[in-house]
Each structure stands twice: as structure tokens, then as C-alpha cells.
Amino acid sequence: MKHLIDPMDLSVEEIDHILNLADDIIANRPKYAEVCKGKKLATLFFEPSTRTRLSFEAAMLELGGSVIGFSSANSSSAAKGESVADTIRTIECYADIAAMRHPKEGAPLVASLNARIPVINAGDGGHNHPTQTLTDLLTIRRAKGRLNNLTIGLCGDLKFGRTVHSLIKAMSRYEGINFILIAPTELQVPDYIKEDVFKKKNIPYREVETMEEVMPELDILYMTRVQRERFFNEADYIRLKDSFILDPEKLKAAKEDMAILHPLPRVNEISVKVDSDPRAWYFRQVENGKFVRMALMMVLLGLDQKA
Ligand code: CP
């Protein structure tokens, strides 16, 4: 049995297999309508979510399975003090696979160490969000036709943005990747990522403070919101929240085939005027999230050869 807690839990070959399966699901949806018949997904969300929880649920329903779960800590016995370990030992009596989001880094790992069913990390604090990474990889591959030889600009809250941390780890395994980190100094990528990923693997990266100075170089622009819920004080959030706003004027300098991604939710960082630009991939990215989670659950349940 396998869990997905960190994007590095998957080899490059396993990622390729999941992305290929997702592509096949997109092309042949009826073929997959009953693959998970009789299987149950539990969504254990101790933190708010729109896309991740609902895409997991839609994915299992589209595979012919069913769904149970809760969408906030307050509506579970966590509110009475139940531990993550006891929660998962209860859930495994009812479900075949679980997706967990938790504000504490490491909570899904603790769950996986106590579980007899596959556990998927659906986002743990400011740490990792591996299924968003699979979504991002599928979107990049569909937009650019490759996952290598790309200059990727990561913009916004690179300190607290768990999707950024997971994406850097995953993309660092492909050839010819060059990262440009666009953030105010206070919101730059944590040192442990610079040491463990960029420096250890000799991956080129640059830190800059404006998107304008690097826009013409980018193949991918990955925008993120400033993560209000992870700030220690409101004044810092207010000072930094509008550091970067992508608008049509700034896009004039970008390549014609640059792809703009955003894990969403968006606050102010992409003007709605950008939504109609063919380079805006973020709503296609949302849709890809469902298909890649269908593929992932099939793999973790050992049903990927069944369709
Ligand atoms: N991208 C993402 O994790 O969105 P939600 O917080 O809505 O799940």
C-alpha cells in the first residue's frame, strides 16, 4: 500500500504514469465510469477548501465510487480533542482511501503512519500540497507539451505557499529547469528549499523583486496569493498583500506562448481582465485537478489496470 504525502513519494516514472492516465481519462471519460464502483473516499478537511475537496469528491463520483467526509475541524470530533491517529483509525473502518487537509505540517504523515488505507495529503500547513503539484504538472505538460527545458517564474508568497514548495521539488527532477523567484524578501522561498533542492541539485535560480524585469524570459508564470491565514500579524499581511498584480499591461512583455498558472483561490494578484487571455490556464488547471485526482486514486487503489 502506498500513500501520497510529499511529491517526492512518487518517482518520475510514477508521475508520468499518473499524467498519462489523466490524459487518457480526459480523452475517454465513459471508459472510467465504473472503475471505482463499490469504493469509498473519505475527505477529511480540517481547513477550508473549494477546489481540492470538491475535485476529490467529483473524481471519486466520476469513477463510480462514493464519498463520505467532513469539511471543517469543527464538524468532526477533532473539536472534542480527538487525535489525527484516532481519526484515521476510525475512518479506515468506513472508507477505502482518504484525502486529508490539515493546518499542521505533518498531520497527514501522522495519519498515514497509523492507517491501513492509502492516505493522500490534500495540503498540510505551509508545507506540501502534492495533488496540486500533479495538477500543475499536468497543466504545464498540456500547455507546453513538455516538463523539461522551461524557465518558470514563481510569483507572490513563496514563503508560505505550499503549492510552490511542492512544485519546486517536483520540477527539480526534470532537465533544463530554471527558476525565477519573484517575491519581496520577506516572502521568499524558505532556506531549507534553497539548500536541499537548488543548491544540492545545482539547479539555477534567481531571486527578483519585480515581475516586469523577468517577464520576457518566462515560459511559465505561476502566480500565488499572499497567504493571510499563515501571517502572525494583520499589519504585515496588509503591507504585502498587493505586492504583485498581473494585468494586461504587464503581459505585453511576455512570450506569446507563456502559460499563466495559479493554484487559486485568487484574491487580487491577477486582474480579471487577464482571464480572457489565451495564456491564462488557471481555470483549465482547476479542471485538470479533477482528472489527475481520478488517476491518482486509481493508482493508489490498484485499479489503474482495470479500465
Ligand atoms: N488550490 C487549492 O488548494 O484550492 P482550495 O484551497 O480551494 O482547495
Image (cartoon, rainbow, N blue to C red):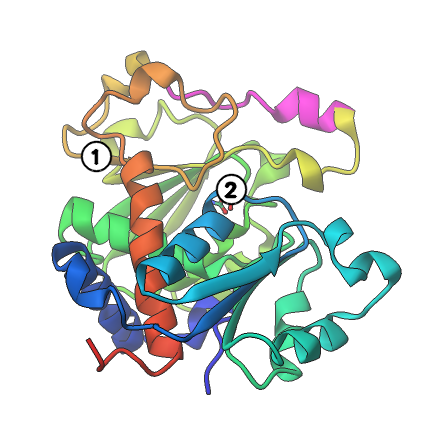
User: What type is the residue that disc 2 sits on?
Assistant: Thr
Magenta stretch: includes residue 198: no
Give the residue at mark 2.
Answer: 50
Q: Where is residue 77 in the image (x, y as percent from the top left)?
A: 79, 62
Residue sitting at x 63%, y 25%: 240
User: What type is the residue that disc 1 sits on?
Assistant: Met
Q: Report the front residue among 2 and 238.
A: 2
Q: What stretch is highlighted in magenta?
A: 235-246
Q: Position of residue 169 (x, y in %)?
A: 43, 62
Mark before the other along the chain sequence, 2 or 1? 2
Element type at mark 2: loop
Q: Is mark 1 within 8 Å of ligand 1?
A: no
The answer to whether 105 appears left or right of 23 in the picture is right
Give the residue at mark 1.
Answer: 258
Residue sitting at x 21%, y 58%: 148
* Quarter of the figure with residue 28: bottom left
Q: Does the residue labelled 2 lie within 8 Å of ligand 1?
A: yes
Q: Report the front residue among 238 and 191.
A: 238
Q: How crowded is mark 2: few (under 14 residues within 10 Å), some or many (20 or more)?
A: few
Question: Vertical placement of 271 versus 171: above or below?
Answer: above
Element type at mark 1: loop
Residue sitting at x 56%, y 44%: 49
Q: Report the front residue among 184 and 167.
A: 167
Q: Where is residue 158 in the image (x, y as percent from the top left)?
A: 53, 43
Report if residue 285 is visible in the image: yes
Report if residue 203 is visible in the image: no
Q: Distance between the residues labelled 2 and 1?
A: 27 Å
Q: Which of marks 2 and 1 is in front?
A: 2
